[in-house]
Image (cartoon, rainbow, N blue to C red):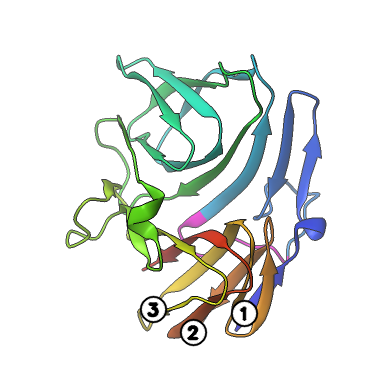
Amino acid sequence: MLQHRPRTELDGGDFGWLKAKHHFVVSDKGNFTHHALGALVVWNDDEIAPGTGFPLHGHKDMEIISYVRQGTVSHRDNTGNEGQTAAGDVQVMSAGSGILHEEYNSGSIPLKLFQIWIRPREPGGAPRWDTRPFPKEDRAGRLVPLASGVPSDDGALLIRADARVLGAALKAGQRVDYFLGIDSNAYLVPALGTLTVNGVRVEMGDGVAIIGETHITIEAIEDSEFILVEVL
């Protein structure tokens, strides 16, 4: 089953410094048809104004993956990690037993990013943070693991969850096939362009929940980039 979630039907809000769209329900006033998919509990599409961001706050027992679509995010946490992640690249934070962090747009243009939260396979553990560049040419015409808890996904950032975060860049008319595990579910969001997933049209900012399918075909209607998360 495919559940198309158009951008216009997502929860969210405009808070001035932050414009947010929530692919999964995050409050008791939200759209409960947009339920979590197992361990995948949050997928926010955020736009953060220059000079603003999320001040110091805490998390525990969560794998938080940020895919930067535009601009650069600046990270700092209480374990001594500090760095920046630019457009097209990925950062991962394993909150583990607890971490305090801040995320800011210190640039001159709006920062656009996906924030993806996945529950870990087990609680606790030392908190950690990492970032890595993922050149778009390496994803041209194929899916590449960006963050993963699967040991065989060489080159991906490590997450402590039974899940994979993959990305691809397709030219108009290109297609890729992806086979899911028999008990897996997945969620896909185009970061750019328009594509079809098993014939269902999905535009930039839309999402599609993939439930109980073992094979999907993704075809670009126009030049497109997308992120796919499979929860194993």
Q: Secondary structure at mark 3?
A: loop
Q: Residue 60: which numbered mark, if any?
A: none
- Residue 202 image point, x, y percent: 67, 69
The residue that appears at 35% across and 79% down in the rendered structure is 181
Question: Disc 2, disc 3: CB below 8 Å?
Answer: yes
Of residue 223 and residue 89, the one placed in the foreground of this image is 223
| N-term mark: 1 or 2 | 1
The residue that appears at 66% across and 19% down in the rendered structure is 50
| Residue type indicated by callout 1 | Leu
| Residue 182 quadrant | bottom left
Q: Where 38 sits versus 15, above or below?
A: below
Between the residue at mark 3 and the residue at mark 1, the CA separation in whole angstroms equals 13 Å
Q: Is 138 positioned to the left or the right of 110 in the image?
A: left
Majority secondary structure in the magenta region:
loop
| Residue type indicated by callout 2 | Glu
Find the magenta span and give its range. 33-40
The residue that appears at 56% across and 16% down in the rendered structure is 106
| Residue type indicated by callout 3 | Leu
Q: Where 97 sits versus 216, above or below?
A: above
For the C terminus, which image quadrant?
bottom left
Residue 61 seen in the figure: yes
Q: Secondary structure at mark 2?
A: loop
| N-term mark: 2 or 3 | 3
- Residue 52 image point, x, y percent: 65, 17
| N-term mark: 3 or 1 | 1
Residue 163 seen in the figure: no
The residue indicated by pointer 3 is 180
Badge 3: residue crowd in 10 Å (few <14, some 14–19, many ≥20): some
The residue indicated by pointer 2 is 213
Question: Disc 3, disc 1: CB below 8 Å?
Answer: no
